[in-house]
Image (cartoon, grey):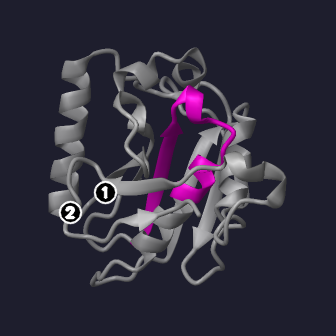
Amino acid sequence: MVEAHRDPVMRQWLLHPVTNADEARRIIQARRADGEAGIGFSFAVLLAEREGPDDLVGGVSVRGLDGAAVAGEVGYWVAAAARGRGIAPRAVDVVCDWAFSLPRDQPLERLELLHNVGNRASCRVAEKAGFRFSAVLPPLLPDFPDDGHLHVRLAGEPQGRLAKGPPPSWGSGYADYVVRGWLGAFGRPHGKVGH
């Protein structure tokens, strides 16, 4: 995670990039506690076939699920070397389907994906993962000095465009990826997102 967060493109868009192993451990522990409390879940996106230390190619989280919340927020990241392979939209799509199926007192009705208006790649990820553009949000100072985009995916809407596999134009270089609970499965199913 630390290595992935050293990427200048990722650092441009993340509010709090991870800069060292202690920060990474604290984040993983906090995400695990969120999962145990049922208020948020984070998943590692790994290569399906173990290849070594670069198996971690991204992460997806769903947060804001506490109490009677009927909406949650989705966040994600993809390591620089893994971009352009359709990993983010596929992983986000799988995690959203999983989140909508969670047994809850109040069913989850919507998921939101927010990003800086200048992050065009996140607009494409949101669209491919079944989110609709909803609004331009004004800056929220001091953390978010630029306008933001709000994308929304409602429960019961069709899966994202990539649910049945990548387009033929991606060729045979498309690899398998697995979404796993962040250092634990939280007692929930894992999803394979490649073909």
Q: Residue at x 66, y 54 (%)?
A: 126
Residue 137 at least partly seen: no
Q: Is residue 136 above or below residue 6?
A: below
Residue 11, how many percent across, how many down? 52, 20
Q: Is residue 156 above or below residue 57?
A: below
Q: Which residue is mark 2?
A: 186
| Percent position of residue 57, x then y | 47, 38
C-beta proximity under 8 Å, tags 2 and 1: yes
Q: CA distance from mark 2 to mark 1?
A: 8 Å
Mark 2: secondary structure: loop
- Name the residue at 72% across, 51% down: 172
The quadrant of the image that shows the N terminus is top left
186 to the left or right of 56: left
Q: Residue at x 64, y 61 (%)?
A: 129
Residue range in magenta is 70-91
Residue at mark 1: 41
Nearer to us: label 2 or label 1: 2
Q: Is 153 placed left or right of 46 in the picture? A: right
Residue 79, position as x, y percentages in the image: 51, 31
What residue do we see at 46% from left, 27% from top? 15
Residue 38 figure quarter = bottom left
Residue type at numbered disc 2: Phe
Label 1 crowd bin: few (<14), some (14–19), many (20+), radius 10 Å = many
Q: Earlier in the sequence, mark 2 or mark 1?
A: 1
Question: Can you tell which quarter of the image residue 23 is in?
Answer: top left
